[in-house]
Image (cartoon, rainbow, N blue to C red):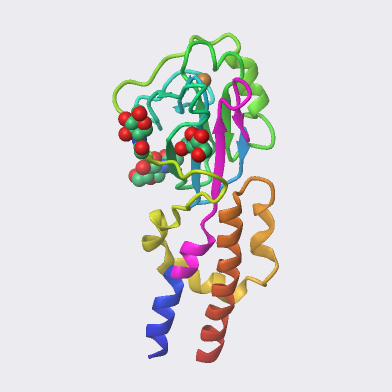
Amino acid sequence: MQLNVLSAVLPLLSTALAKTTTIAVGKGGLIFDPNTVTAAKGDVLEFHFYPQDHNVAQSSFDKPCIADAAGIWSGFMPVTAEQGVGNETFSVTINGTDPLWLYCSQGQHCNAGMAMVVNEPKSGNTLKAYLDAAKNAQPTDPEGDYRGGIIAAATNSTSSSTSASTSASGTASGTASGTAATQPSGTSTAPASSTTTGAAVKLETAGLAVLGLAGLVVGGMI
Ligand SMILES: *[C@@H]1O[C@H](CO)[C@@H](O)[C@H](O)[C@H]1NC(C)=O
Ligand SMILES: *[C@@H]1O[C@H](CO)[C@@H](O)[C@H](O)[C@H]1NC(C)=O
Ligand SMILES: *[C@@H]1O[C@H](CO)[C@@H](O)[C@H](O)[C@H]1NC(C)=O
Ligand SMILES: [Cu+2]
């Protein structure tokens, strides 16, 4: 009985703690905003596209602006000035903590600094080092259709929907019980501050509520 409750709660817990970071592509210049993001396994990057025609492609650190053959690729996302923002988003789930280097393959955008990193190293392979090397690169477009992410309809206004369900199911069993038992109430919200959307913050709040519930359940069992 109690085990059944626990197995019902833990997947919820994992879902609720996944963080969605909204990234503006080409809003107000040849930039990703933010251009450095910290994300954990299961977190989601949700790209929103602005005029006129940008994209998200993946390179290695060593070859800035050069497409990885099997890397993340949104495809080109043309948006008119009249539209203001694209009607489709591209969402990528993060699977680990290795740095992930992303750029826009359009024209000379990458040379101009249109690149970003997920989980930037503190020294050595920094975003600054990447951008410096990118200035003299010869950008390439990835081949083929979009891959490594999901294209979805953009929701209008600030209350964007979250895609927290994407990665939750598989990850709960192994680690969540330890997390629930040891995580004090205050700590899990800390990384959320500047990069998450309002919806994601709400999600984290929901996560805390579920965390408390899970704590009660776990506590009750011992
Ligand atoms: C959002 O709504 C505004 C006003 O209705 C509209 O002008 C704009 O094109 C819409 N944006 C998207 C992405 O649908
Ligand atoms: C994580 O794995 C999923 C499923 O294979 C894939 O679609 C996604 O692109 C991967 N994320 C990264 C950052 O490579
Ligand atoms: C976005 O707009 C394009 C061009 O008008 C259209 O083909 C596409 O179906 C739209 N996508 C969504 C999700 O509405
Ligand atoms: Cu671009």
Q: Is residue 82 above or below residue 205?
A: above
Is residue 215 covered in magenta?
A: no
Looking at this view, is 18 or 80 the one in front?
80
Percent across and percent down for residue 190 are 69, 57
Q: Residue at x 52, y 22 (%)?
A: 81
Percent across and percent down for residue 3 are 40, 85
Q: Residue at x 65, y 17 (%)?
A: 132
Percent across and percent down for residue 110 are 54, 17
Q: Residue at x 67, y 24 (%)?
A: 128
Q: Residue furthest left?
A: 144
Looking at this view, is 3 or 32 the one in front?
32
Percent across and percent down for residue 179 are 55, 70
Picture quadrant of residue 185: bottom right
Picture quadrant of residue 150: top left
Q: How many marks do you count on the picture?
A: 0
Q: Check the picture and name the quadrant holding the N terminus.
A: bottom left
Q: Is residue 107 above or below residue 155?
A: above
Q: Is residue 200 visible?
A: yes
Residue range (magenta): 12-34
Looking at this view, is 157 or 182 the one in front?
157
Q: Residue at x 53, y 46 (%)?
A: 97
Is residue 33 covered in magenta?
A: yes
Looking at this view, is 2 or 33 the one in front?
33
Q: Is residue 47 visible?
A: no
